[in-house]
Amino acid sequence: MPEHPTVEAAERFRRALLAMERRQAVRYVQAYGQIVQELQVMIEALTAEISLMDEPKAWKVARLARWKSLRAQIVGEIGRFGAFVDTDLQTQIAQQVALGLQHAQQMALAGIPEPMASALRAEWNRLPTEAVLRMMGFLAPGSPLRESLVTQLGEAVASQVERRLLLGIALGWNPRKIASAISRELGQGLAWALRTARTAQLWAYREANRASYVANSDIVGGWIWHASLDDRVCMSCVAMHGTLHKPDEILNDHHNGRCAMVPVTKSWSELGFPGLPDTRPQVGSGRDWFEGLTPAQQQQYMGGSMWDAWQAGRIGWDDFSREHEDGVYGLMRVMPSLKELLGEDAKEFYRR
């Protein structure tokens, strides 16, 4: 059975956004890869010096001039990368907000027959991109998001590298293993930047959707949480899939979350078109979809121990999605761990 045009539009726009994000990720990977390549020479020089020490000790390595130089270089180079990401991200987010406002109208009016669609389009309140951007506090100068990129990323990565280096020395790792560990820790900076960029852009896009729905609440009665029900979806998103929300509610997905807001207009009678059949979008519940899977498939999504506890009636369906406080976005929804749900009683269901 084909999807409703509104749902199809939401899926199409979601795919387009993720394609844009992938192109951006390629740019970030290339820029970061160049930095790591340049640092690699200094890493090899450091590990070569460590290999010549009679008895490497963590405190001795921490005092090496070569290590201090490498650390300073990490802070500087990755700090500059963070500033580059911040500048690029502001441009990309402005584009996402503009698309979010445009797509909100297109999704809301998708599938509505003429001349009703034209009448609603003429009444649609169009918001300026700049005004919506100003509403998003997480984008403001000095916000936790921007500070983490501009002033904290380089130092955070350098500190993590330092901890790993000194741990390796304390555990007696050979220089080759130490060099490999340092390179892996350097990669954390790229992983964090990619997650930050993707989350910020998807969040801004959805917030633009929401701002448009609120500004047109005489037309839009609410929105439906719509998850990508594929092999990467988490149980928090499955639990929220199909739930109906008011126009001003936030779709507070987790980091890297791909969920979308499917708008639902008010009834045709409320919009001044009585007597027409109700053709607004309907989305089945995530629970119905999940219960249609085989037990083996359910355990792949939920985890064996969690599934056992659910089957035993120790946790309910609504337990799979809970809010937690995030320092940048406020409340975000995540899937809790079994221990968070059951405390020490979780041991009863742990599998080897």
Image (cartoon, rainbow, N blue to C red):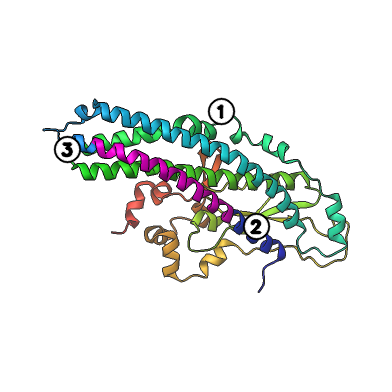
Look at the image and give the residue range highlighted in magenta. 18-46
The image position of residue 132, as x and y in percent, is: 70, 39
Q: Main secondary structure of the magenta part?
A: helix
Left or right, 303 with reference to 291: left
The mark found on residue 142 in the picture is 1
Callout 1: few (<14), some (14-19), or many (20+) C-alpha neighbours within 10 Å? few
Q: Which residue is mark 2?
A: 13
Compute the Cα span from label 3 to label 2.
54 Å
The type of residue carrying mark 3 is Ser
Callout count: 3
**Type of amino acid at the residue the image marks with label 2:** Phe
Residue 329: image quadrant is top right
What separation in Å lies between label 1 and label 2 (alpha carbons)? 31 Å
Point out residue 103 in the picture as x, y percentages from the top left corner.
71, 53
Q: Earlier in the sequence, mark 1 or mark 2?
A: 2
Q: Quadrant of the N terminus?
A: bottom right
Does any portion of residue 93 appear in the rendered image?
yes
Where residue 49 appears, x then y in whole percent? 20, 34
Q: Where does label 3 land, which residue?
A: 51
Between residue 330 and residue 306, name the one nearer to us.
Answer: 330
Q: Secondary structure at mark 1?
A: loop
Furthest toward the bottom, the residue is 1
What secondary structure is marked by label 3?
helix
**Discs 3/2, front:** 3
> Which quadrant, please, contains the C terminus?
bottom left
